[in-house]
Image (tube, rainbow, N blue to C red):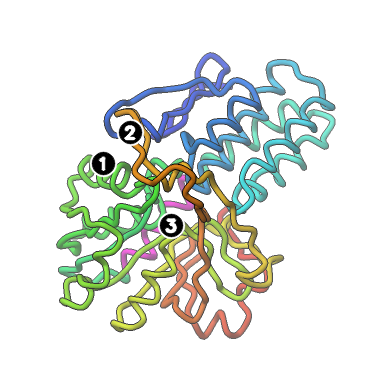
Amino acid sequence: METLTTTSLQVRDNQLWILDQQALPQQKIWHPAHTVDELIDHIHTLRVRGAPLIGLSASLLLALLAEQGQEKQQLEAAWQLLRQARPTAVNLMNNLGRMRHALDRDDYVHALRIEALRLVDEDRRLCDAIAGHGARLVKPGSRLLTHCNTGGLATAGVGTAIGVIRVAHQQGNVRQVWVGETRPLLQGGRLTAWEMGELGIPYRLVTDSMAASLMAAGEVDAVWVGADRIAANGDVANKIGTYSLAVLAHYHQLPFYVAAPHTTHDADCPDGASIPIEQRAGSEVTGVAGSFGSCRWAPPGAKVYNPAFDVTPAALVTGWVFDTGVVSQAQVAAGILRRPLSGLR
């Protein structure tokens, strides 16, 4: 496979490399992801994260393993293991579903390569389309609040919610971005703040618990978030803390937008209650660890509840911004999300 580079993924010398998103912003470290076990470990430890990027990394590795000479039976086993790496992010299942069709062909080595590269190119185009549709919703002088990280680190392109913010900023319509730190792993504080700085977008970092006071003070004009899975009724699974922001936005009568590619939509999932929610290690809550070292603040033996995601009911979403266009509350009520969305091809 030819050399390929995104913000967080590289293919060089027929091997996959990933940018360690746990080490950012203090260090920029590229790790090998040459085997299924290596990539799954990177996914579990969130060195690789972001629903689109997880699906792309798994697809690229499968294609590279085929080019390296693995037999179809080995590739089928790899496909199954990769598909189970993270249960909530449906992009992984959608991308690997397409890779499965390629694997079933007689010329599967060539087919897997073509499909993996197509998925990367498609994600770039999906991000551009999302950003274009979403930017039209951003009013001049907007102060936007975002959660977690939804930029180039999480996709092959400009990102989803951050892609919207990026284009709206280029159009001169973003006065400031409020970046929620996103506890417990601080993807907002570490990654989104870094991306805002790299893009030259004015931002201020706030703790998650400050959002309510900002809204009450009239300092927020809209909330923009991404998604890991969108159910057929419009319910949205996203990074833990998203639901809280949706409730606050509803109370303060602020627009709450979800930006995502059509690969995040799951027409076979009836509602948010049917979305599997990943539970993560308690150590993420009892302390903090990163390239700087580690620190524990909770008492020994503290019991922890640590879901990685929560579900925002469709009734709290102002609009769903896909690559195919903006979906309204009325369209969701009419059942538009109960069938597959037609994506870019």
What residue occupies the far top of the structure in this picture? 13
Q: Secondary structure at mark 1?
A: helix
Q: Would you name the residue on which mark 1 appears?
A: 194
Q: Earlier in the sequence, mark 2 or mark 3?
A: 2
Please indicate whether residue 42 sits to the left or right of residue 87 in the image: left
Name which residue lies at 33% across and 28% down.
293
Please indicate whether residue 225 sits to the left or right of residue 230 in the image: left
Real-space Cα separation, disc 2 to disc 3, in angstroms: 28 Å
- CB within 8 Å, label 2 to label 3: no
Q: Earlier in the sequence, mark 3 or mark 1?
A: 3
Q: Is residue 167 something one can see in this rendering? A: no
In this view of the protein, which residue sits in the foreground, 206 or 3? Answer: 206
Q: Would you name the residue on which mark 2 appears?
A: 24
Q: Which residues are magenta?
A: 124-136
Q: Is residue 54 above or below residue 135?
A: above
Q: Residue 343 in the image: state x and y as whole percent.
A: 58, 58
Name which residue lies at 82% across and 37% down.
104
Q: Would you name the residue on which mark 3 appears?
A: 129
Q: Residue 297 in the image: state x and y as whole percent.
A: 34, 43
Q: Residue 192 in the image: state x and y as whole percent.
A: 30, 47
Please indicate whether residue 107 sits to the left or right of residue 176 in the image: right
Q: Secondary structure at mark 2?
A: loop
Tell us which disc is closer to us: 3 or 1: 1
Real-space Cα separation, disc 3 to disc 1, in angstroms: 24 Å
Say what amino acid the circle numbered 1 marks. Answer: Trp
In this view of the protein, which residue sits in the foreground, 90 or 328? Answer: 90
Q: Is residue 45 something one can see in this rendering? A: yes
Q: Residue 211 in the image: state x and y as whole percent.
A: 26, 67
Real-space Cα separation, disc 2 to disc 1, in angstroms: 8 Å
Name which residue lies at 47% across and 26% down.
10
